[in-house]
Amino acid sequence: MRRFQITRSKVRLAVALALVPAAFLADKATAARSAPPAEPSVVRTDAGLLRGQTTGTARVFNGIPYAAPPMQALRWKAPQPVKRWDGVRDALTLSSACPQQDNPEAPGGSTAEDCLYLNVTTPAQKAAKPRAVVVWIPGGGFFTGAGNSYEASKPATRGDVVVVTVNYRLGIFGFFGYPGLAGSGTYGIQDQQAALRWVQRNARAFGGDPRNVTVAGESAGGMSVCAQLTSPTSTGLFAKAVMQSGSCAFNWADNSQYPGQAADSPWVPQNTVQRTGTDWAASRRDDLKCKPRQAMLHCLRAADPAVLVEDTLQFTQPAYGGTAVLPVSPAKAMKAGLFHRVPVLSGNNHDEAAAWMSAFNGGDLTDADYPRLLTDMVGAADAMEVQREYPLAQYGSTVAAWTAVTTDRIWSCTQVANDQQAARKVPVYAYEFADKHSPLAQPGQGAAHAVELPYLFSLGGYDFPMSETQKRLSEQMIDYWTAFARTGDPNGPGRPHWAPVGHGDIRGLSLAPTDQGGIKTVDLSTEHHCAFWDGL
């Protein structure tokens, strides 16, 4: 498998266009409405007492450690238990984001390896019985992102669930590999499992039911959820799964996400990531300030995190093989039916790939560029077939046509393939977010990657302005998602019926406000030409 190689400028472009929705600028958060006075709230966890706060209708506990700081001797090791503390520990402020380069979720970047923390939000009112728990894994390409970006009072209080948002190791800290290094390429995935185990031990302290946990995520978070579906070491840690804009089958063709990018997937064999780690470490030995005859792993564990984060983009793919965490590629595991038998809610945004159009000549594409783009993607022999399936005249511009082609090939049909595989064994509810005027939508991009997130969360502590029809769609989506978390069935009063997918083509709900057609059933396989891509 060829490595995922793109320039840093392109990565920053991806962050700016596709991942900004998960963070948002501090001035917007500052401009958010002032919170009413908070009331203290104390719970007992397995490591000690925690003091959170009750604000309005929600109880919030921020910055809870779920594993020991993975620093120095614990760098690139499986997450270790938290040390108990005496007295009452404040859980009132968010932790640092895990190490990552500068991006909107971590302005200026982060080198804080003491970052394995989670946040818990619950309704303030006590329940007669334990509530369902939703564990949210954030996206960010496996090299950026933080659970801290997702303020969860809306889904917790409206949906009557406990919401847990998680930080996990990213980039070189989460997915580095080296010969003899146990767990090479899986530390971020292991962190997610450590958080899920923390939930199993501590859910009841927050009024949650450890037997009714839903693991959910978007983008790399959705891919992580699918990885957990196929991981033997996540057995018993969750009862349902939500995959938004990310699946085990996700992959890309040559030059389809970025010019010059080779075909690949998120998953890489462990021996490949170890070879990459060996080559990288040898090339950086002087920068790492290794001592003469010092063992490389000792040098690496002593290295300044600021030096490591400079090359974090070399390690953005979870590893499989040679480890109990992901013994085989998640894509192959799903195809073979080797996944946990839990209900699944899965979907995409209608125009996912629009967020990447600026990578192609700044989004300035002419009609003459279309055949070249297709040829660079699938070769001359198949380019004509793609052009017949997606005629330029039908879309009105090369940008619109190229968006449709790459959305379908990279995002929609890979998600549909996983839905088909999962539906052979478990209930699957498929969807497509289709609001072309989300408050995060850029002009002309429609329902691009990640623009559904403010319909489920307050992002960066900020509630984006919405029209009345959009507010209603947000309420319906939260109701669907949290009903699924509670019962495994998203249906309930006040919203259109959502049928599980059957055999053959994948039919699901198109989620749009009423002034854009409303919520209705669509054939996702046909809409996104999936039979064509299967046969190409």
Image (cartoon, rainbow, N blue to C red):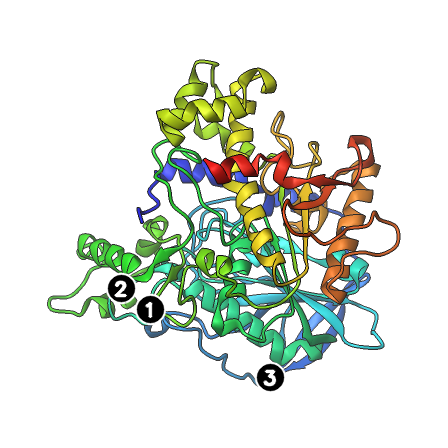
Q: Nearer the viewer, residue 33 or 286?
A: 286
Residues tagged 3 and 1 counted as in contact (Cβ below 8 A):
no
Residues tagged 2 and 1 counted as in contact (Cβ below 8 A):
no
Give the residue pinned by disc 2. Answer: 178
Q: In the image, residue 469 lies at what x, y percent?
A: 82, 37
Give the residue pinned by disc 3. Answer: 46
Question: Gap in Å between the C-alphas at discs 2 and 3?
Answer: 34 Å
Is residue 186 positioned above or below 536 on the image?
below
Give the residue pinned by disc 1. Answer: 322
| Residue 229 disc label | none
Mark 3 is surrounded, within 10 Å at the Cα level, by few (under 14), some (14 to 19) or many (20 or more) other residues, namely: few
Mark 2 is surrounded, within 10 Å at the Cα level, by few (under 14), some (14 to 19) or many (20 or more) other residues, namely: many
Q: Classify mark 2: helix, strand or loop.
A: loop
Q: Classify mark 1: helix, strand or loop.
A: loop
First in residue order: circle 2 vs circle 3: 3
The image quadrant of residue 518 is top right
Badge 1 amino acid: Gly
Question: Gap in Å between the C-alphas at discs 2 and 1?
Answer: 12 Å
